[in-house]
Image: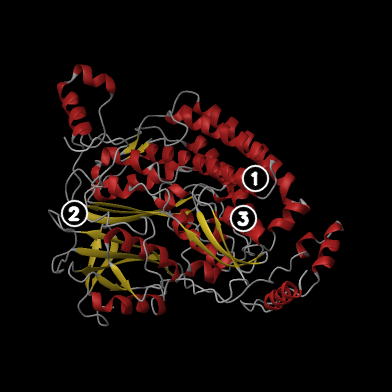
Amino acid sequence: MSEQTKDSVDEVIEVVDEDPLDRPEIEDDPEERRLEAQTDEGAQQLRPMDPRTRELVLTGGQWPEVEDIDDTMILNIGPQHPSTHGVLRIMMELDGEIVLRAKAIVGYLHTGMEKTGEELTYVQGSTNVTRMDYASPLSNELVFSMATERLLDVEVPERATWIRMLLVELNRIASHLLFQATNGLDLGAVSMIIYGWRERELTLRLLETITGLRMNNNFIRPGGVAADLPDGWRDDVLELCTAVERGVAEYDKLLSENPIWRERTVGVGLIDTQQALALNVTGPILRSTGFAWDLRKAQPYLAYDDVDFDVIYTQNGDVFDRYQIRLYEILESIKIVRQCVERMPPGDYRVQDRKITPPPRARIDESMEALIHHFKLFTEGFRVPPGETYVAIESPRGEIGCYLVSDGTAKPYRLHIRGPSFYNLQAMDAMVPGGMFADAVAVVSSIDPIMGEVDR
Amino acid sequence: MLERFPGSIFADSHGQVVVYVDRAVWLDVATFLRDEEQFTQCVDVTAVDLIVASSRPGPVGVATERFEVVANFLSHPRNRRIRVITEVPAEDPTVASLTNLYPGLNFAEREVYDMFGVEFSDHPDLTRILMPDDWDGFPLRKDDAPARVPVTFKGDPGPR
């Protein structure tokens, strides 16, 4: 090694020693921690619970010029990268293996669905919105339908409400199972993708027997749901509940006490309640900070005030807690689903207003009026009185809202969906910096972003 | 609140509280809501382009302009929501940014800028978020037609 090269290496080492973010030092020796990890106890103490809490930097501004190009490295991840859940692109500034800053760059899946929504009638609208958050399509349909119904001043029948609740909860189970599978895969617990997918496939198969489609169901529509529940649905649902419960117990056994899993997740990606609220974070990430806020309890819609379930929340705000919350929320959803099976009321599955919902197929052959209604509904749609409203519900990822403006025609004047992932992604700015690069993958995975909803 | 911000108009929109405020007090209203009325989150900011609206939503007395910027506030301690709307004229589409109060609105305001061309003063990073950086036009404006982008086909023989 020439003298000159050696000098510059020393220089780099010197620079690295200065902590550019003024992070609190992790006092213990990494080698010592590694040795400690080999003992069978104290996996949780491996990383002190609070070493990386720091002042919240929330600028999001242009990055300042890097003064010395040798200090740090800008690394681009994505948009096509297996751990980015679709087409998320992340720019990271790295100092060795420590992430100094991370910036999410979105828009690669932008297809102008809000603009499309302005061109489709309210009857067609749920086909459009269901494709936004493709892991929980029924939540999108529900929030759109509820907003439309509020503008129409229509009350849906009780049975429709309970069918909706059943479906949305089944969908929440499927979505959280998807999270368990991909989260495990991202963190190296590769077998989780098989187990998670196994139960998720059962759930989707059940949704297929009820709605006709595995995903993008287009089943919850303004005025009710598209069809009644099929024969024998009770047995299918209960069978699924047992299978998923067995699966959840297995994941719990596989991961929760697993020292490798705990080392990868406990104390990683910390965020506290104040930061989460400031960054507009909702859903499981907010609940992982010890803030028990769930719209199903706080501002009940459908029949959630009628069923018995608990809001799961934890105190630490790390990746492990978010994993745990989603795991136990599956069990709470099963609780609700069981109550739906038990208490499903009889009656209509949609409003019997022919201006809003189509007549039964058989009536079209015998009634001229039914034929006209059917034709008018599917060509022109129905008119919605002028007005504007914002409806919010709890999707598996947090608060999904629909801001709907009508000018009195059959098409929405403005359709805006507040996607929870869009806002939750910003929490990355608070959770990633100061941690190791490998932890950033864990953090992004624990946010559980669905890019279809981020970009819309 | 009426005493603090004289020009504002309250309305009831299908059971929800809506306030139409003047653009000049946009930031003050948000500060007031956050600091004195315990509205802990501003869950969403969006906009509406009213240029072709045949009948405009909203109560009588609101001087309508081309754009409406809409913010939905949520108070966790009081479990209430309020929607604040301000009118933004087309010739000067600027409104104060709320990112200093609610940092989580960073993406939302960028989206509104990207889609409507409404600018937020004092926003830390007002760049396009969903569209490409070199995009021309603002897609969600009503006069920005979809599919207006010229498509060049491979081997296009050109005009005949």
Name the subunit of mark 2: B
State the residue position of label 1.
Answer: A185
- The reply to whether discs 1 and 3 touch (Cβ–Cβ < 8 Å) is no
| Percent x, y of residue A415 | 29, 51
Q: Select label 2 or label 1 by which is in front.
A: 2
State the residue position of label 3.
Answer: A441
Give whichever of A370, A417 is nearer the camera: A417
Left or right: residue A244 versus residue A3 is left
Picture residue at 57% right of the left edge, 56% below the top: A444
Give whichever of A384, B123 is nearer the camera: B123
| Percent x, y of residue B10 | 23, 69
Label 1 sits on a secondary structure element that is helix
Left or right: residue A440 versus residue A41 is left
Give whichever of B147, A262 is nearer the camera: B147
For the residues labelled 3 and 2, the Cα–Cα distance comes to 41 Å
State the residue position of label 2.
Answer: B143
| Percent x, y of residue A443 | 60, 58
For disc 2, the neighbor class at 10 Å (few under 14, some 14 to 19, many from 20) is: few
- The reply to whether discs 3 and 2 touch (Cβ–Cβ < 8 Å) is no
